[in-house]
Image (cartoon, rainbow, N blue to C red):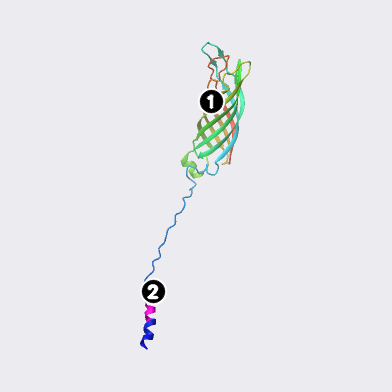
């Protein structure tokens, strides 16, 4: 008779033992992905990564005298250009620029399809820009390099159809919003010798004044 009670008691012992052991709940922290704070160095670039625009270009071509004392006097000319850019940081952008070059002197004129890649640094004031997320007047400086496919007028011929070009630029952008800006700039433009047969070692150079608009998206 006693054996009838012993077996159920033995079966219940493991359950009672487990009930007596306290359980520990361990909190596991899951990794959280870092999210931009909105005040880092890509706060603006992240929302407006690309831009396009166009500019009017007024160029003052420089006088030149070759080794044989043959001189040409530079004239003023006008042209238009377009560009597309990539904003890498709020203060740095890369820009591809197309310029329809129109160089003039008293006895010579050159035209060219000129492509340049520009590196541009925007002078945003961090302690103001990071707080208010806007800066209406943004100065900038930059450098550029590229190639120009040229042709000559006024009876001159070119020994080289393609010439390297270089530029240094500076200006001010007036940003009316994060999307639209006006651009007022200066560029020193230099072309390596295009090989004009009427004057030796001509390296066309110009002071260029530019005004245009830019749309970011």
Badge 2: few (under 14), some or many (20 or more) residues near its Cα, within 10 Å?
Answer: few
In the image, taking residue 168 as reference, residue 25 lies left or right, namely left
Location of residue 105 by image quarter: top right
Q: Which residues are magenta?
A: 9-17
Residue drawn where x is 54% and y is 33% of the image: 172
Q: Secondary structure at mark 1?
A: strand
The residue sitting at 59% across, 23% down in the picture is: 150
Residue 10 inside the magenta-drawn segment = yes
The earlier-in-sequence mark between 2 and 1 is 2
Give the residue number, with chain letter if any, for mark 1. Answer: 165
Q: Quick one: quadrant of the N terminus?
A: bottom left
Of residue 39 and residue 7, the one placed in the foreground of this image is 7
Secondary structure mainly formed by the magenta segment: helix
Q: Secondary structure at mark 2?
A: helix
x, y percentage for residue 73? 57, 16
Q: Is residue 84 magenta?
A: no
Q: CA distance from mark 2 to mark 1?
A: 85 Å
Position in image of residue 123 (x %, y %): 49, 36
Q: Nearer the viewer, residue 100 or 213?
A: 100
The residue that label 2 is drawn on is 19
Residue 204 to residue 135: above or below: above
């Amino acid at each position: 008779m006693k054996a009838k009670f012993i077996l159920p008691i033995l079966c219940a012992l493991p359950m009672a033992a487990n009930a007596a052991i306290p359980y520990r709940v361990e909190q596991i922290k899951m990794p959280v992905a870092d999210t931009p704070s909105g005040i880092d160095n890509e706060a603006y670039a992240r929302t407006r990564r690309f831009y396009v625009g166009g500019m009017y270009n007024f160029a003052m071509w420089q006088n030149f005298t070759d080794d044989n004392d043959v001189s040409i006097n530079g004239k003023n000319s006008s042209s238009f250009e377009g560009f597309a850019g990539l904003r890498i940081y709020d203060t740095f952008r890369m820009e591809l620029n197309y310029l329809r070059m129109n160089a003039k002197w008293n006895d010579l004129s050159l035209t060219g399809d000129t492509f340049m890649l520009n590196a541009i640094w925007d002078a945003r004031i961090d302690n103001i820009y990071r707080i208010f997320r806007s800066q209406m007047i943004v100065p900038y400086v930059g450098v550029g390099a590229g190639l120009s496919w040229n042709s000559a007028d006024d009876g001159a011929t070119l020994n080289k159809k393609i010439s390297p070009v270089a530029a240094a630029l500076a200006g001010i952008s007036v940003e009316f919003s994060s999307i639209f800006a006006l651009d007022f700039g200066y560029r020193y433009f230099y072309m390596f010798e295009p090989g004009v047969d009427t004057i030796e070692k001509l390296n066309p150079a110009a002071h260029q004044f530019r005004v245009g608009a830019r749309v970011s998206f």
